[in-house]
Amino acid sequence: MDKDENIELQDESTQKPTEEAPAQTSNVLGNKTIEDVIAREAKEEQDTSSPFSISRTLGGVIIARAVQRQIGLVLLVCAFLIIYISNRYLCQKKVVEIAKTERQMRDMHNKAVACTSMLTEKSRESYVMQLLSAYGDSTLTVPNEPPFLIRVKE
């Protein structure tokens, strides 16, 4: 019989809290408003002992505070990055322009060397004599005697 009584007592004890539980829940929620619940939860979140909790870090609270404190530095770094990138593009543009100018300079130098060699070839005595004989001009000839110096006394 002891076993039967224990079972009955356990059944009665388990039934009473289940009946009273909805009453307690309704009593707790009945007295408090939604604003009170939200305020209590916010207070519990602020009462956390560690400022570096995972939920606060993932939520962005710590990162947002750090960015707010360092906004001037962040803007300065962004400005320097923009200046750095624009200067790099400007330098690359100048390098391309310098390479193009050097290529043009080499081409002009090669043309100057070619023109100089053609002028040297056409101004040779043998070439001039060939041209004169080709046109039939007989008044100019190569002298047979070497040139002599005329000395004048002062």
Image (cartoon, helix red, strand yellow):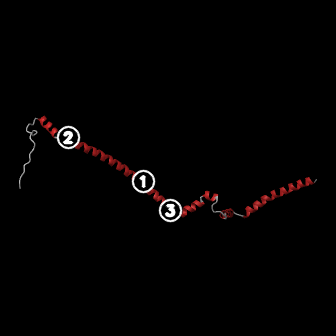
Q: Which mark is residue 73?
A: 3
Q: Secondary structure at mark 1?
A: helix
Sequence-wise, which precedes: disc 2 or disc 1?
1
Percent across and percent down for residue 129 are: 13, 38
Displayed quadrant of residue 18: bottom right
Which quadrant of the figure has residue 59? Answer: bottom right
Residue on which the image places disc 1: 88
Mark nearer the viewer, 3 or 2: 2
Q: Quadrant of the C terminus?
A: bottom left
Task: State yes or no: discs 3 and 2 in contact (Cβ < 8 Å).
Answer: no
Determine the CA span between mark 2 and mark 1: 49 Å
Q: Are marks 3 and 1 in contact (CB under 8 Å)?
A: no
As drawn, 61 above or below 136? below
Residue type for callout 1: Arg
Labelled disc at residue 2: none
Q: Amino acid at mark 3?
A: Leu
Q: Is residue 109 left or right of residue 140?
A: right
Q: Which residue is mark 2?
A: 121
Give whichever of 103, 38 is nearer the camera.
103
SS under mark 2 = helix
Tell me which numbered mark, 3 or 1, is placed earlier along the sequence.
3
